[in-house]
Image (tube, rainbow, N blue to C red):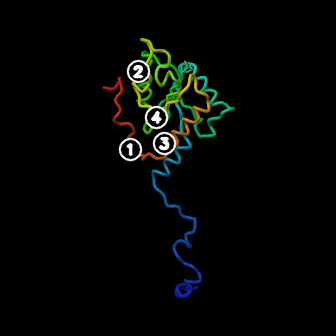
Amino acid sequence: MEIEDLKHHKGSLNLSADSLLGDSVVVTKVDAVINWGRQSSLWPFVFGTACCAIEFMSTAASRYDISRFGAEVLRFSPRHADLLVVAGTVSYKQAPILKQIYDQMPEPRWVIAVGACASSGGFYDNYTTLQGIDEIVPVDIYVAGCPPRPEAILDAVIEIQKQLWREPTLEARKSGFKGRLDE
Ligand code: SF4
């Protein structure tokens, strides 16, 4: 059919841009595409020091199966990880190590404090125990419990997924945070 004929039949053929492209083209934002990928491929670094770490192991194992949420690729190199999961009591002696691990993780990175000890020192209100990891690193989600159940840890991962979905990808996160070990 010639172009002129097409123009003539435009009404009956419905040659609007919408109908020609159909659903073969999707328009979106870079943030949305990148965050969509990040949401389903969080790579956790687990800083497990005590009983809460056992709960995390259960969360990652087959019964609770953290891979249903795309977060099963545990990394024990901070440079590979974007989700720091602190599960257990953190002493003042360990604090600089935790801080160094956080500093070595590339942006964007998220932090979950699992359980009472990581969140607030728990019942270890003494001279050896850090009274919450937010004294040295910024925390995105606190999980209550001593220990929290695996479902609560999964819920924290889901909350991180919701949170990152709303974040711009090129903006440094928590850049204003100053902890006790920062200059
Ligand atoms: S919060 Fe309770 S279960 Fe978790 S590390 Fe502390 S003492 Fe252990």
Give x and y (percent) for residue 34. Answer: 49, 48
The amino acid at mark 1 is: Glu
Q: CA distance from mark 1 to mark 4?
A: 16 Å
Locate residue 56: give its quadrant: top right
Residue at screen point 60% across, 40% down: 69
Q: Mark 1, residues whose alpha carbon is within 10 Å: few (<14), some, or many (≥20)? A: few
Q: CA distance from mark 3 to mark 4?
A: 9 Å
Where is the N terminus found, in terms of image quarters? Answer: bottom right
Q: Mark 3, residues whose alpha carbon is within 10 Å: few (<14), some, or many (≥20)? A: some
Query: Which residue is under mark 2?
Result: 96
Q: Mark 2, residues whose alpha carbon is within 10 Å: few (<14), some, or many (≥20)? A: some
Determine which of the numbered discs, if any, sits on residue 140 in the image: 4
Q: Secondary structure at mark 4?
A: loop
The nearer-to-camera label among 4 and 2 is 4
Locate residue 95: give its quadrant: top left
Taking the image as four quarters, which one is ligand 1 found in?
Answer: top right
Query: Which residue is under mark 3?
Result: 163
The amino acid at mark 3 is: Gln
Contact, mark 1 vs mark 2 (Cβ under 8 Å): no
Q: CA distance from mark 1 to mark 3?
A: 14 Å
Give x and y (percent) for residue 40. Answer: 56, 43
| Residue ranking furthest to the left | 183
Determine which of the numbered discs, if any, sits on residue 171 in the image: 1
Contact, mark 3 vs mark 4 (Cβ under 8 Å): yes
Residue at screen point 63% across, 40% down: 68
Does the Cβ of the disc 1 residue fall within 8 Å of ligand 1? no
Give x and y (percent) for residue 77. Answer: 50, 29
Contact, mark 3 vs mark 2 (Cβ under 8 Å): no
Q: Secondary structure at mark 1?
A: loop
N-term-proximal mark, 3 vs 2: 2
The amino acid at mark 2 is: Pro
The nearer-to-camera label among 1 and 4 is 4
